[in-house]
Amino acid sequence: MDALLKLSPAQSLLLRTAARRPDGRVISPDTLRGGARVKVLTSLLQRGWIEPADGGHTLTSAGYAAIGQQRPIPPDDVQPMDTTGDLQLLEGIPIRPGTKLAALVVALRRPQGATSLQLMLATGWQPHTVRGAISGMLRKKLCLNVVLAHNDSGERVYRVV
């Protein structure tokens, strides 16, 4: 509880929003710019609450503890999707490569499809947002035939046919 008192509002905001993301990535809001952003990130780095990773920063276990949370443990049965041939899977669909919607389409166009959890991890979205994007953008606006099936363990598996 003492660690909660040592956080500034900006530090608390960055740590709490990073803790909500599946990958723990720290993304500063548009309102935090320039020197203020540098000071907040520097103080979090010095305390060991964040660490540099992939051109940005991610939350450490100490960072989760600073806001009174535990680092989520990813399930063992989730397999990472390979990214080879992603542009081929986007052919004929008017979506900009590199966007979250493109990641959604790439995952759905694979022969095995993608589970809800895989789609959430690929986009960083909540489950209702994933389902809404499939229903609204992919099915209605882009006229893609997205089918839903259940695998052996009962998980939803979405696939573009």
Image: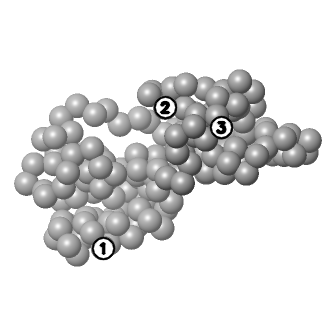
Measured as percent of width and height from the top left, residue 9 is found at 73, 51
The amino acid at mark 3 is Val
Residue occupied by mark 3: 40
Against 16, residue 24 (above or below) is above
Q: Do the residues under discs 3 and 2 have CB atoms within 8 angstroms?
A: no
Q: Name the residue: 30% across, 55% down.
A: 101
84 or 66, nearer to the observer: 66
Say whether residue 21 is left or right of residue 151.
right
Question: Label 3 neighbourhood size at 10 Å, few (<14), some (14-19), many (20+)?
Answer: some
Residue occupied by mark 1: 136
SS for tag 1? Answer: helix
Say whether residue 123 is left or right of residue 106.
right
SS for tag 2? Answer: strand
Q: Do the residues under discs 1 and 3 have CB atoms within 8 angstroms?
A: no
Measured as percent of width and height from the top left, residue 85 is found at 18, 35
The amino acid at mark 2 is Gly
Q: Quadrant of the N terminus?
A: top right
Q: Quadrant of the C terminus?
A: bottom left
Give the mark nearer the N terminus: 1 vs 2: 2
SS for tag 3? Answer: helix
User: What distance separates the C-alpha of mark 3 from that of mark 2?
Assistant: 14 Å
94 or 31, nearer to the observer: 31
- In front: label 1 or label 3: 3
Residue occupied by mark 2: 56
